Amino acid sequence: MILIVDDKPENIFSLKKILELNNFRVDTANSGEEALKKILKNAYALIILDVQMPGMDGFEVAEAISGYSKAKDIPIIFLSAINTDKRFVTKGYASGGLDYVTKPVDPDILLLKVKTFYRLYEQTMELTQIQDTLREEIEFRKEAEKKKDEFISIASHELKTPLTSIKAYLQLSERSIHDGNSGTTRQYLQRTMVQLDKLNNLIADLLDISKIESGKLKFNKKHFDFEPLLNSAIDIIRQTHDGVRIILTGKANVQVFGDEVRIEQVLINYLTNAFKYSPGTKEVYVDVSTSPDNQLVVKVKDNGIGIPAEKQAGIFDKFYRVEETSHRFQGMGIGLYICAEILRRHNGTYQVESEEGKGSTFSFTLPISGVL
């Protein structure tokens, strides 16, 4: 849009007509003060500014515009009927004008100048947009490199921990075998298997991340009963976590269309996290229900450390770890991201409700395909 600034209505009328006949959008102002108010509110590609005006003259308006960060790059064409000597024209350029046209205005010359500056403005805006996009891309890549380095460091630590434990337990097992103590050997081997399971889960998560990134995460979908899957996931957690209680409420005698193994993976992740982030407690609550819009609703509630409100929005993001817990609890920040991807691919939803120091409730929904 082009802004015409002139204190004489007849001048504005003629200039406005010339520009509108050539498909330019036009706005007008009858004084320098009005022009500055409009420039603060609107975006203009060009300003045609009369020099001789009561109150603020054109030079003062141009100098004021140069102080506005959002408007300082708008090209200005000065119009004047007098004072066309060199010093006066020089003052116009010094005030921020890009060109100077004398009255009476030649329409053809004015249009040529307007088209030229309008095109230059559009090209400048395009270049600015390209620069902003490149800057964002660079910042994203810097940030991405930082996250990659952090992830490699975390992954190396997480993988090293069970490997170190496995090595130690095998060495102890070897000694106990040498001493003929079969009971102790069995105990060390059982602990070795626990660490191997941890290592296997870590590697599986890393492989899932790779498949998600490459678009190769496969799903074998079919209709299945949800209740047996739920009971299976709860049983797995009870076997791998000594002395825990999982209190189940509600019923979900429904069928779901999806990948049974992947949905179980989500449940196991939710339950594992519930105990992991509830140190000193042995109870977790699971509630299942159906919603009026034919959705299966599963909630896993713990009485753990909770999540600060400002950290909850990113909890399902890749590599996200709540800073307050990253040094206390092991993890690579990818489990919930994988869960989110699985649920998205099943047209499901996921959510967290939490209060710091009072526990968390992680939930998800899945479309019901049938009722038993």
Image: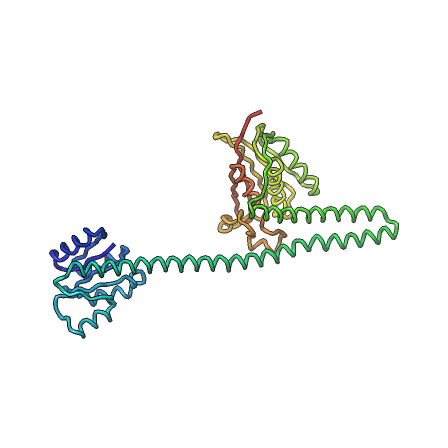
Q: In the picture, residue 252 is in which quadrant?
A: top right
Q: Quadrant of the N terminus?
A: bottom left
Image spot of residue 129 (x, y percent): 38, 57
Residue at figure coordinates x 58%, y 59% from the top left: 149
Q: Is residue 349 left or right of residue 9?
A: right
Residue 259's place in the image compared with 357, above or below, is: above
Q: How is the image coloured?
A: rainbow
Residue at figure coordinates x 78%, y 49% from the top left: 188
359 vs 326, nearest the viewer: 326
Inspect this view and state whether residue 293 appears.
yes
Work out which residue is located at the far top of the displayed protein and give it.
372
Q: Quadrant of the C terminus?
A: top right
Q: In the picture, residue 217 is in which quadrant?
A: top right
Inspect this view and state whether residue 56 appears.
no
Image spot of residue 234 (x, y percent): 65, 37
Q: In the picture, residue 341 is in which quadrant?
A: top right
